Image (spheres, rainbow, N blue to C red):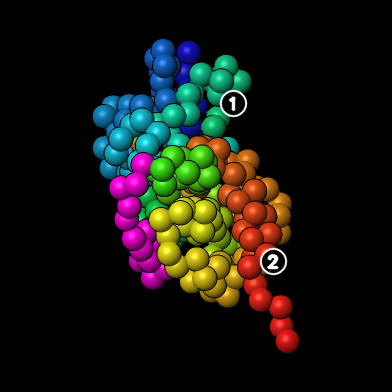
Amino acid sequence: MFLKLKVRRQLGQDVWYQTFEVPYQEGMTFLSAFWWIKENIDNSFTFRHFCRAGICGTCTVQINGFPKLACKEQVLPYVLLGEPVVVEPLKNFEVIRDLVVDNEKVIRKMKELKLWISSDSSDVRIEAQISQKIESAADCILCCACQSYCPQVLESVYAGPLFFAKIYRFIEDPREKEKELRLNQAVQMGHLYHCLSCNKCNNVCPKEVEPATLIRRLMLYAVDNTPASP
Ligand code: SF4
Ligand code: SF4
Ligand code: FES
């Protein structure tokens, strides 16, 4: 059995689609298939990965139009279908080469918004509250699947689901002291209300963070915590 891949390649301004046939091996993931191509057909084929375990979020690519973690996505269902599978880099990001995109903007924005806890605590009662309240938001691995699939990210002022999931985490984290700042980041800086509530980000998140659901919770939080105008 063979996996047929139609891969978008890019080197500088040159873009082309290249077809590969990869012999299926039991338990093969897309990342293993990429490595097979690199080792056996074309060692210039470029992709990114680190942990190979669905934890680091670096290997996300588009598979038949959907963002997926290449190290987790099994090839078997696609092999059985027998049709070529289209593999492309993430949308909404600039391509550096082949399947590798430039996520510098995301990293810069995280630094700009200071997306880390402003105080720390070793109080075990607080730790217990943390795990219950922010369980799903804390599972985010920054894989950018949601960010690449969100139609509203094309609007430059809209922060995007990845950032709202993070901001929600801080608003609900009892250790975070800057709740007002976080709310301002979501509503004023991130344009929270531009969300279309289309749920596309919920559908593609590999960690079930459900950013669209967290965005709706953030909206309710904003209503409850914004002082009424005089
Ligand atoms: S629900 Fe909002 S954040 Fe999620 S994909 Fe749609 S517009 Fe983007
Ligand atoms: S919310 Fe989900 S899809 Fe978005 S970056 Fe985090 S883990 Fe990835
Ligand atoms: S290589 Fe780390 S999530 Fe895939």
Q: Position of residue 103 (x, y in %)?
A: 39, 58
Residue holding disc 2:
223
Q: Nearer the viewer, mark 2 or mark 1?
A: 2
Examine the rendered structure and indicate whether residue 92 appears above or below residue 35: below
Q: Is residue 116 inside the magenta stretch?
A: yes
Q: Marks 2/1: CA distance?
A: 49 Å
Q: Which residue is mark 1?
A: 83
Residue 104 in the image, given as x and y percentages of width and height: 36, 62
Residue 32 vs 211, above or below: the answer is above
Residue at point 71%, 83% (across, down): 229
Precedes in sequence: disc 2 or disc 1: 1
Badge 1: how crowded within 10 Å, few (<14), some, or many (20+)? few
Residue 160 picture quarter: bottom right
Q: Is residue 15 magenta?
A: no
Tell me if residue 69 can be seen.
Answer: yes
Q: Amino acid at mark 2?
A: Val
Q: Residue at x 64, y 54 (%)?
A: 217
Quadrant in which the C terminus appears: bottom right
Q: Secondary structure at mark 1?
A: loop
